[in-house]
Amino acid sequence: MSNEEHAGVVSALDKLYEFDREPVSDEKLQPGKRFAGLFAGEHVAGTEFVIGALFVSWGASPFDVFVGLVIGNLLAVLTWTFLCAPIATQTRLTLYWYLRKIAGPATTAVYNVLNAVLFCILAGCMITVSASAVRIPFNIPPQTNWYPESAGFVLVVLIVGTVVTTLAILGFKRVAQFGSVCSPWMFLMFMGGAVAMLPVLAMQAGLESISNWSQFWEIAHAFVWTGSTPEGDPGLSFWHITAFAWICNLAMHGGLSDMALFRYAKHWSYGLYSAFGMFFGHYLAWIFAGIMGAATARLLQVSMFDLDAGGVAWQALGVTGIIAVVIAGWTTSNPTLYRAGLAFQGVTPGWPRWLVTLFTGVATTIIACFPFVFTRLLDFVGLYGLLLVPVGAIVFVEHWIFPRIGFTRYWVSRKKLFVSWPALLSWGISIAVALLLQQTGTLHLFFLFIPVWFLTAILYTILAALCGAREQLPEDDDIKTAGMVDTSAPTEAKEATPEQPRQADIVLWSARAVAIVSLLVCLLLPFWVYMQGAGAYETSITVMHKILIWPTLAYFLSGTVWAIRRDRQKSGDAIGT
């Protein structure tokens, strides 16, 4: 590549500007459908195969799963809506830069590095999940140890990681577009896989089919969520399931990391769009994945711990299952890697976001070669949220509480302090107390976030008062929030554009019609297998595996055409290019 060509590529990448260090301008705010698609795509994802199966392995009961997950996921939606989204829409900043204004460079650097590393591990897990499906056509064995056992698996991870990193570099709009196209089909794959595997559970119970809810509930208790572990120990309780559903994305909502996404929201109520992810993903997809995993384990007569996401999806959906797991992993790792790049940018001044994301993607892909998170995902998610939620408490207190009790907001920035000892001490003390409570068996990991959040908030308020937060200080302009700058775009006269040819509308609506019909076929095929019953299961599932790939390909072709043409017809709706 010549110097001119290299300069041209760098220049094009630099145009992928995402308001990394200043408030998002008004003309770049996104409609609700972007957030619905993003959340659905991210949370109807590869982790759902893993978590849904772990609930089975860890001995949850049907009541715990069906009722506990409703409460926990509702609490998560409310946390996004009333805690994270309002601060994001008021400041229009990422958490990383708003935290710098609140707690100074040192605290921000510690947080950004820790947050980015944890994001990389989580995104790496999702790349591993995608690779668990790609491995199947190449006869690579499942990778269930913490280290890779196959050079072929490492090669697969490198390829998948390259694709994920490229999409994350393209920015929020491309990540959201990718999720909005994938999410309807992915949800149907989760549902279809579970429905198609119900005859296997019926066979286990000596039935031809499951004909009513009462039969399903009894079979679910006997063969799926049995209430005990494979070793016969008591399983997860109702409150464990509820708490886990709430904390599964604690760093994003309670820890405010998703300010990076909601800074593009037109209103704080857009936090409610997280319900598309929580209830289609963290509720239904976990249930469907549990059914698929339990049925696959009983069909193959193996332990759940010997299965990976790719193996389960392959058994339920055939080749289409491989595609489902690959895409499910991508739609989670893409926005996660995007967040990680934003976090690292806080400690790489002067670096463009695309370059930071590139290096972050390389590190994440290397992590993905070691599937250790895959085997301990529930514990990692709990620890991840616990480590980062104190920062959310600090920001909440400074943003909402300080003005109401007469303290000076942004006192650290106004005093030009490099280190905020109140922030670091309250964060460190709270985590130390949490680890002590866990080690002594006082509280389970899933329940620690509540005392940690309140302890951090109280400690920070007291320590900040002792260190200068009650002083009246001059305004600081180093980091502007949305209220300090005019984020609206200048009004310019728009030239009249020629009317689009009629054919453009025909193509658009034709693509939409094909996409809808394709999804309908994807939905009906698994129900046809279910209606055939246990006696004809081998024949019907084989037929479904052969046919299902065709409506899938038709959907992605037509759905992509529809999404691209729809967005091209709208102006002023893009972030970046």
Image (spheres, rainbow, N blue to C red):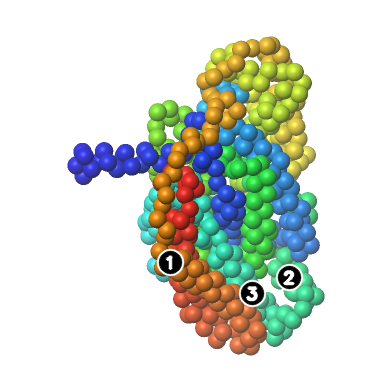
Residue ranking furthest to the left: 2
Question: In the depicted view, which residue is nearer to us: 411 or 476?
Answer: 476
Sequence-earlier tag: 1 or 3: 3
Q: Would residue 577 be found to the left or right of residue 515 on screen? A: left
The residue identified by callout 1 is 502
In the rendered image, is residue 75 in sight? yes
Q: Percent from the top left, x then y, of residue 521?
A: 55, 77
Question: In the depicted view, which residue is nearer to us: 232 or 566?
Answer: 566
The residue identified by callout 2 is 220
Q: Percent from the top left, x then y, of residue 46?
A: 55, 58
Q: How far apart are the two marked residues, 2 and 3, measured between alpha carbons? A: 13 Å
Q: How far apart are the two marked residues, 1 and 2, measured between alpha carbons? A: 53 Å
Closer mark to the observer between disc 1 and disc 3? 1
* Label placed on residue 195: 3
What amino acid type should be assigned to the residue bearing mark 3?
A: Val
Q: Please say if 323 is above or below 164.
A: below
Q: Please say if 116 is above or below 246.
A: above
Q: Percent from the top left, x then y, of residue 105?
A: 53, 22
Question: Which quadrant is home to the N terminus?
Answer: top left
